[in-house]
Amino acid sequence: MTVTGSPFKTDQVLEDIATYTAAPTPFSETARTTARYVLMDTIGCGILALRFPECTKLLGPIAPGTVVPDGARVPGTPYVLDPVRAAFNIGCMNRWLDYNDTWLAAEWGHPSDNLAAILASADYISRQNRSKGKPALVMRQVLDAMIKAHEIQGVLALGNSLNRHGLDHVLFVKVASAAVSCALFGGNEKEIAAAVSQAWIDSSSLRTYRHAPSTGSRKSWAAGDAAARGVQLALMTLRGEMGYPRALSSPKWGFQDVLYGGKPLRLDRPLGAYVMENVLFKVSYPAEFHGQTALEAAIRLHPDVADRLDEIERIEIITHESAIRIIDKTGPLHNPADRDHCMQYIVAIGLIHGTLNAGHYEDEASRDPRIDRLRGKMDIRESKVYSRDYLDPEKRSIASSVQVFFTDGSETPRVAVEYPLGHKKRRDEAFPLIMDKFRENLRTRFPEKRVNRILQLNSDEQRLLSMPVDEWMELFTSIESRGSYELDS
């Protein structure tokens, strides 16, 4: 296959992504059911984020007051935007609280970040179709696009570590969003390959904003930016813009030679539905996923330590190498984005409060002197077994253990958690709690009558699959609920 506008053979990774995206795929019941929960959980996280002015100040059109006729809606807001700007808005909301799904491999990321591109594109297409007397897309197409976007991003992440080259994982969001949005807009296999090649040519932002001493709020809108760019590149391609078939492999000037140490990019397994079937949910706690098992362990220890915090001499955390590389932080933490990516902070909150919510990262909560006292007593060490099992595709564990030692020589039991609540091995336990989380998140923005309608519809998989996309989006944006969602900013 050649990319549009070029005589050269396409890089194999680009070709495989394009072929997979363009082809109809019979997905498993497990994949579709999981996608439905990802849809609810991700939109719920976005709705909850509208409580935070630091998020809402970034939303809306670039030029205030701009409204796009029959444009894409932004859930929980009155905004009607072009699909590129809508993708940024939706992605910014969904990602703001670091509370949506997660994928851990050689590269890390949040595959549901692609939902921003999918919903913005699908709503825009549906409303434009309606205005021309054509049928809207249906939610089955949204769920199938989600499965494909998860797979593209997640399988790229299995064997390709951007972080070891200082690059941010949102490049894989841009690639996946470009592919699936191009397909939703009617792009063929060659056009999808061209759009994806443009995403690789764009390359990636640096990880600067994810690491001390520069951790900042850009990490909360970087995925929205990548999803929006993916939509933009897809639309440009469909207007005839050429692609670059050797975007990865061109000697000296391709992505691999310039930014990836000369190593070839690869897909470690055939593209199907593996990622959606195995994706991780942040069910109860908005914390960086590598710290979820340590947080669960700390919460289990809370009853044993809550009345003895002043007697603690040492706290021992044993975890896997990736957690140490990403979220082992000492010294001052400057903002919520810094705190929610600090293992010590997360564990301290769990020990002190027996829970964790987004408010615990805010400045007021962080002033509690007990937090830094406990952080100063923590010793983090790697378990080679935990690190090995983390990368084992048959286990995919994210194990950590926590034990507390007191000044009188006594100690708590060592609490080890191998699989967090959001792991595939704990789906039966997690799904009811994800529904509870969705309900509570919706209640922060919508009246109870609307909440019940949304819950009823999304609980009925067959009804959801056949529902027009624009009607589904209307549930989150119609006039009936507007009195309850004025923006906070």
Image (spheres, rainbow, N blue to C red):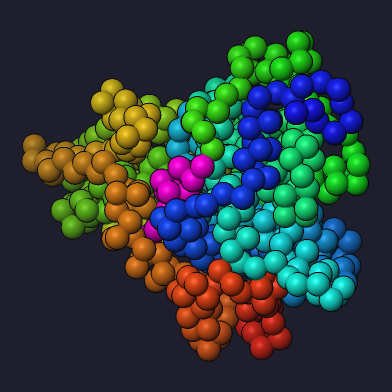
Q: Residue at left 61%, top 22%?
A: 265
Above or below, 157 relative to 91: above
Question: Mostly what secondary structure, the magenta segment?
Answer: loop
Relative to 322, does residue 49 appear above or below in the rendering?
A: below
Front-most of 158 and 141? 141
Percent across and percent down for residue 191 are 79, 40
Decide if residue 242 is on the left or right side of residue 259.
Answer: right
Q: Can residue 212 be seen in this view?
A: no
Decide whether residue 276 is among the magenta residues: yes
Q: Is 102 left or right of 143, judged from the image as shown?
A: left
Q: Residue 75: x and y, percent?
A: 66, 70
The picture quadrant where one finds residue 21 is top right
Side of 420 relative to 456 (left or right):
left
Residue 290 in view of the camera: yes
Q: Residue at x 45, y 74 (%)?
A: 459
At horizontal 51% and vertical 42% (from top left) the residue drawn is 272
Q: Residue at x 39, y 58 (%)?
A: 283
Residue 52: x percent and y percent?
60, 64
Q: How many labels does the image show?
A: 0
Residue 144 position, x and y percent, is 58, 55
Q: Nearer the viewer, residue 319 or 240?
A: 240
Q: Quadrant of the C terminus?
A: bottom right
In the rendered structure, does residue 387 fall within the stretch colored magenta? no
Q: What stretch is highlighted in magenta?
A: 272-287
| Residue 468, picture quadrant | bottom right
Query: In what quadrant of the picture does the N terminus appear?
Result: top right
